[in-house]
Amino acid sequence: MKKHIGLFALAAILSWGAAAYALDPTISASPAPSGQITGQLDRIQGDIYTVKDPAGREVTFRVDKDTKWEGSPKVGDQVEASIAPDGSADYVRKISGAKNRGSSGSESSPPFGR
C-alpha cells in the first residue's frame, strides 16, 4: 500500500512540473517575430513575406495597408524590414545595390493584396 501511495505521489509531482512548464509564457515553439530583419526575400504569398537571414533562418511576416515601402522588393532581393510584435511589418526596404532579378529599376510601391 505504501508503495502505491509513493508512486502516486511521484506521478503527481511529475505531472505538476510538466503543467508548470507548459504554462510558462517564456517558452514558445515559434516566437512571434519582432525587431529588425535583414536578408534575402525568399517568398511572397499574398500579404505574407518570408526573408532568409544570413544565418539561414527564415522569418515570416505580414504586410498591410500601413506598411511603409522603400523601393519595390521582389523575390531574390536583399531587404530590411522592421517587424512589430504582432508580426506585421512597419516598413520594408529594398537594400540599394541589391540584385533586382530583371526589374526595370522602378522604385514605385508594390501593389497591396496581390
Image (spheres, grey):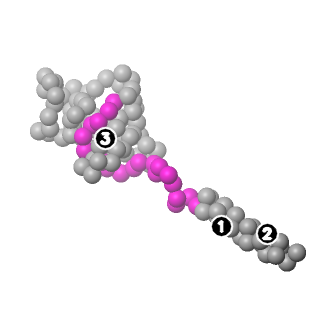
Q: Local crowd at mark 3 within 10 Å, few (<14), some, or many (≥20)?
A: many
The residue located at (18%, 40%) in the rendering is: 95
Q: Position of residue 82 (x, y in %)?
A: 33, 45
Question: Hey, what amino acid is under mark 3?
Answer: Val
Residue occupying the far bottom of the picture: 2
The residue located at (56%, 58%) in the rendering is: 25
Q: Local crowd at mark 1 within 10 Å, few (<14), some, or many (≥20)?
A: few
Question: Hey, what amino acid is under mark 1?
Answer: Gly
Residue 51 quadrant: top left
What is the secondary structure assignment of the residue under circle 1? helix
Which residue was labeled with disc 3? 51
User: Compared with residue 53, is residue 45 higher up or lower down, i.e. above or below?
Assistant: above
Extent of the magenta region: 24-44
Residue 46 quadrant: top left
Give the Cα separation between the discs numbered 3 and 2: 49 Å
Q: Earlier in the sequence, mark 1 or mark 3?
A: 1
Which residue was labeled with disc 2? 8
Badge nearest the viewer, 3 or 2: 2
Which residue was labeled with disc 1? 17
Give the Cα separation between the discs numbered 1 and 3: 37 Å
Is the C-beta separation of discs 1 and 2 under 8 Å?
Answer: no
Q: In this rendering, would 87 be left or right of 77?
A: right
Indicate the quadrant containing the N terminus: top left, top right, bottom left or bottom right: bottom right
Q: Is residue 41 magenta?
A: yes
The residue located at (51%, 54%) in the rendering is: 28
